[in-house]
Amino acid sequence: MKLHANWSYPTQMRFGAGRISELPKVVKNAGIARPLLVTDPGLVDFPMVQNAFAQCQNAGLGIGLFSDMKPNPTGTNVMAGETAYHDGEHDGVIAFGGGSALDCGKAIAFAQGQPRPLWDYEDVGDWWTRAKADKIAPVIAVPTTAGTGSEVGRASVIVKEDSQEKKIIFHPNMMPVTVISDPELTVGLPPFLTAGAGIDAFVHCLEAYCAPTFHPMSQGIALEGMRLVKDTLQSAYDDGTNIEARSQLLAAASMGATAFQKGLGAIHSLSHPIGAVYDTHHGMTNAVMMPYVLEFNRPAIEDKIALITAYLGIQDGFDGFMTWVLNWRANLDVPHSLEDFGIDNTKADMIAAMAANDPTAPTNPVKLTPKAARRIFDAAYAGHLSIQECKSSPS
């Protein structure tokens, strides 16, 4: 089956293998003449980036390049990008790469025209109204991983270094004007990153579905997004060249980020500070934390999990879902505990306090207090669950 389409929800999306060839046209259609291509430092010398850069040059675009960012981009990285943007007299951004590059690129496009510090536009109340909306530069998003869904997001997650916190910078106009979703760009993703990114997309859908807010459209998108990841992630992990599996995962990633307008929960509440303090891969951190948060939330989500399992073809309700999750993680080589993941417990109290204060905490189905967050952290560190993982293959 050929997976190739044009979509306009939640923004204009050009989906399909080989569509990166349309980048110069897309940039020009957005009214951009001098784009700054923002990418991960690990990608900057890859042919996919070099070819995209050359295509834009050959099309007469005054393109520049910026790649000075950490795996969890910081405010300092965004400021450096702003300087590069102004020094090159750019008028738009191509955010090209994984979640780090997409978040950093969107933040640069936003911050370069604002009079106040980046942190004054955190996703708190109506702080976004402080921004000069007409000064936000247009963004073209090109994802190279299938996980964060940042290509269809109206926010960026940026680390505030002095407090070691991940802050969500939000404005409706941060949504990229066009996304090029080309699954061929994800073919080179190694198994570890394929697993982490894919489970990130699954967790976005799972937490959105379980969030205690009313948003039926997100609910439907979340359910189908989980199915796509369940059915294809193992195939992409086992054979990175499986273009159909890569395509389905790329679609699921955008679906997850669309669905979580409904809300997220404690998996993210804990993963955000763990990532900020220990600089871990966000998706893999979510993968480690998932069963422990599921167990904590069980009293409030058991009925919803029963609906999920019915749709996904998993037997035995919540217990069956937990068994499948544990087997699935094991088959994808996800560390079982935070200790296995290389995280120590010396900052557990700080992590717990930050988790309870994270913007994703209010939509967790069970109230997330610092004490509760510490209990989840301790369980995840020790690898303790009330249900023991099975050794059979996942459903």
Image: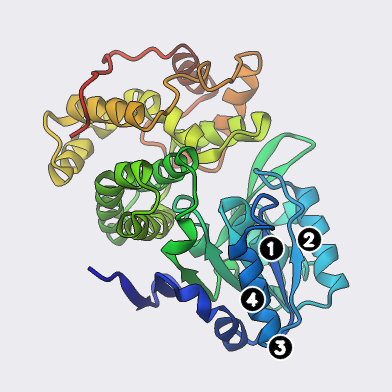
Mark 4 vs mark 3, foreground winner is 3
Residue 368 to residue 363: above or below? above
Residue 101 to residue 367: above or below? below
The tag earlier along the polypeptide, 2 or 3, is 3
Residue 129 to residue 80: above or below? below
Q: Residues within 10 Å of mark 3 (few under 14, many from 20)?
A: few
Q: From the viewer's perspective, is 17 left or right of 76?
A: left
The answer to which quarter of the image holds residue 46 is bottom right
Label 1 residue SS: strand
Q: Is mark 1 in CB contact (under 8 Å) with mark 3?
A: no
Kindly identify the residue that appears in the image at 66 percent across and 87 percent down.
59
Kindly identify the residue that appears in the image at 65 percent across and 13 percent down.
346
Residue linked to disc 2: 81
Mark 2 vs mark 3, foreground winner is 3
Q: From the viewer's perspective, is 391 left or right of 8?
A: left
Under mark 4, the amino acid is Pro
Give the alpha-carbon distance from disc 2 to disc 1, as whole Å: 8 Å
Residue 12 appears in the rendering: no
Residue linked to disc 4: 138
Q: Quarter of the image for the N terminus: give it.
A: bottom left
The tag earlier along the polypeptide, 2 or 4, is 2
Give the alpha-carbon distance from disc 2 to disc 3, as whole Å: 23 Å
The tag earlier along the polypeptide, 4 or 3, is 3
Give the alpha-carbon distance from disc 4 to disc 1, as whole Å: 13 Å
Q: Is mark 2 in CB contact (under 8 Å) with mark 1?
A: yes
Under mark 2, the amino acid is Gly
Residue 73 location, x and y as percent?
69, 47
Residue 95 to residue 138: above or below? above
The answer to which quarter of the image holds residue 48 is bottom right
Residue linked to disc 3: 60
Under mark 1, the amino acid is Val
Q: Residues within 10 Å of mark 4 (few under 14, many from 20)?
A: many
